Image (cartoon, grey):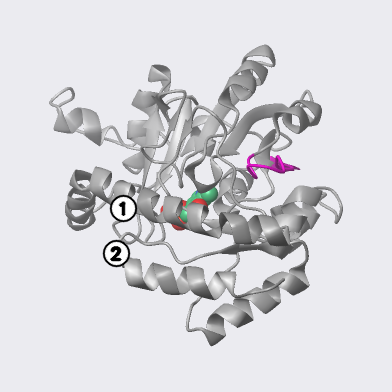
Amino acid sequence: MSALLLNLHPGDEVIVPSYTFVSTASAFALFGAKPVFVDSDRLTLNIDPVLVEAAITPRTRAICVVHYGGIACDMEALLDIAARHNLVLIEDNAHGLFAKYNGRPLGTFGSLATQSFHETKNITCGEGGALIINDATLIERAEILREKGTDRSKFLRGQVDKYTWVEIGSSWVMSDLLAAILFGQLQRADMINAQRVAIWDRYDAELASWADRHGVTRPHVPAGCEHVGHVYHLRFNTGEQRARFIDHMKQHGVSCVFHYQPLHVSPVGRRFGGFPGQCPVSEHAGDCLVRLPLFNSLSAEDQSRVIDSATSFIP
Ligand SMILES: *Cc1c(COP(=O)(O)O)cnc(C)c1O
């Protein structure tokens, strides 16, 4: 819906991070735009504002940022770039619902922000999502697009006496059954996020000395960022170390998984001009990052096992 609301034309470019899930880029490519991949900041793995500005061309229409792990991007710099170049800023906030940047919730900075309620996210209904619209001029058309291109929303409010086909849209309404599950999750959101943050904090405190001793990189939370404990990750120096770590954890009965494969070197990314070496930070994270188990019902005993297993590993 973000892509449709932008009225993208073939040849238009949308700047996206390479280190993200496929959907961030695919959504725009689906409607004819070219995703332009930009590397991430080494500390946060969030899109690097300096590289964003360097990637802007006369064809750039929008910048879509991802708050990796729910830790905010440098929104001050990104908002400034978007304003100076007259570009739409979109937040892919799949990781960061209720997280904050300088006290303000993520998803309220961009003209548009997207949420995911996929089963892997903090707040979930299995599959689902939401579009947050901060630019009021886009609301009326968004309502039409999500209702199969009809003005049914106006009809339901009694503003028209029948509804009809007024635009080319699709069916993006959530079913009532899923909405009921999501409602329960939202009512418990503070509790769910607090439990996740407590688990995240414990990992960070108890792995610090082991990680520092062995040159393993822990997540970085810049000042002003209040996150929601979406991902706890470690970065090794080589892919070989990561593979041995995953294997070591498996032998201790702990399942650890890596995360994104950078989009710029994927088969589709290469069709859009991506090439190896273009985004070195993303490529390193693709090879060397691993996530530890993190879910709100993870018990203290189980977490101790994860920590003991991890700290018995020598890279
Ligand atoms: C999960 C995720 C998505 C996709 O969410 P869906 O609900 O599957 O559409 C998009 N972007 C990021 C960064 C994600 O983590």
Magenta residue check for 48? no
Residue at 55% x, 87% y is 251
Residues at circles 2 and 1 in contact by the CB criterion of under 8 Å:
yes
Type of residue at label 2?
Ser
Image coords of residue 58 (percent x, y): 78, 23
Name the residue carrying label 1.
195
Q: In this view, does 256 lie to the left or right of 297?
A: right
Rendered position, 253 above or below 234: below
Figure quadrant of residue 296: bottom left
Residue at 49% x, 36% y is 2
Dot 1 lies on which element?
helix
Name the residue carrying label 2.
297
Image coords of residue 23 (percent x, y): 55, 52
Rendered position, 248 above or below 1: below
Image coords of residue 45 (percent x, y): 65, 45
For disc 2, the neighbor class at 10 Å (few under 14, some 14 to 19, many from 20) is few
Type of residue at label 1?
Gln
Image coords of residue 22 (percent x, y): 59, 55
User: What range is drawn magenta here?
Assistant: 33-46
